Amino acid sequence: MRNAEVIRQWKILKRIEAGRYTTAQDLAEEHDVTERTIRRDIEALQEAGFPLYDERSEGRKVWRLIEGYKQRLAQTFTLSELAALYFGRNLISFLNGAPFASDLEAAFAKIQEALPARSLPYLSRIQDLFAARPDPWKDYSQKKDVIAALVDATLHQRQARIDYFSFNSRRTKAYTVDPYRMVYHHGGLYLYARAQEYDEVRTFAVERIQRIEVLDAGFEIPADFNVSEYSRGAFGIAGGKPVPVEVVVDAKMAGYIRERMWHESQELEDGGDGSVTLRMNVAPGWELKAWIKGFLPHMRVVKPASLRDEIVRDLERAGRRLSGAPRAASPRAASPRAKSPGAKRKPAARPAGGRRR
């Protein structure tokens, strides 16, 4: 009941703010409540600091909002727009520690200052109705200089030399990069950049850049390369060359697939048994594999066959680890249980892990 009351009052404020000649009777009919309830709502808004007043027009008492309340900002934001920005503060909490976090704090302080002081507790009540559950985020408090340098290099198209810790090799590598774009994804900041040493575009996690030096040399993005197309090929953050991917989801989980846009290239086709076929053009990286595994055993990979085979091998390795079974021997190595008497044991092959950025 309390939530319904707050939402109704918010709608009343927006209607009055729109400048329409609104009576208590009009509002009561719109919200299917009594005029007495509307008057209580308006009193609550007035007590919260919103400058509402009544005047007579054509023999009716109408409600208005005092003009001039928004002159404190250079931009003519409406009161509801200011409040909406105030709500949005929680949505960008992932930027804590970034070099522009202090600027955002200053901006929100100005927004708060522009709002009626008595309205803040009221707005906090509304804010409690809408929550953004954040993804696991990364702390950039120690990377302010790195981010600032990346912004400078990207904005002015200047090459940079970075020391980057690679999860693949478990060591720090030096790269000379052409930084194309910084991207936010699932609580983290990433850099799309062409690595000069490999002459290919790679995805770098900003928190793993240990040192950066912005160089005087400039760069041009090749005419045959489109950063947006590269990122559109990603199923997540890691870009790459997209390939046709097709999966079939059984009836038990098909509803979850239908209700969401998983990728902008997706096409859905319903099956007669309640299943759904999902087709996309995406890079078949570790993020796509992780997503597919999350829907098992209700999802089947039709193509590409290489993606299906990789997932099968991953699941076989996972099964052995979960059961505590010893590692499987390589095809050339004899199994310890099957080896003939006197045969020399060969070391088991190390399983190949999926490439992960």
Image: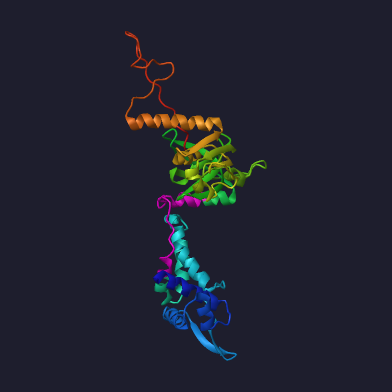
Name above or below for residue 291 compared with residue 56: above
Coloring basis for residues: rainbow
In magenta, the rendered stretch is 124-150
Q: Position of residue 215 (x, y in %)?
A: 54, 44
Snapshot quadrant of residue 335: top left
Residue at 51% x, 87% y is 54
Left or right of 235 on screen, residue 221: right
In this orientation, which residue lies closer to the viewer: 243 or 38?
38
Task: Look at the image and tell me whether residue 66 can be seen.
Answer: no
Name above or below for residue 135 compared with residue 111: above
Q: Position of residue 144 (x, y in %)?
A: 44, 52
In this orientation, which residue lies closer to the viewer: 228 or 314?
314
Task: Look at the image and tell me whether residue 210 can be seen.
Answer: yes
- Say if the magenta span includes residue 130: yes
Left or right of 346 on screen, residue 218: right
Name above or below for residue 341 compared with residue 195: above
Residue at 49% x, 52% y is 148
- Say if the magenta span includes residue 80: no
Q: Position of residue 276 (x, y in %)?
A: 55, 43
Quadrant where the N terminus sits is bottom left
Residue at 67% x, 42% y is 223
Which residue extends farthest front? 273
Which residue extends farthest top? 342
Q: Position of residue 271 (x, y in %)?
A: 57, 42
Which residue extends farthest right? 223
In this orientation, which residue lies closer to the viewer: 346 or 215?
346
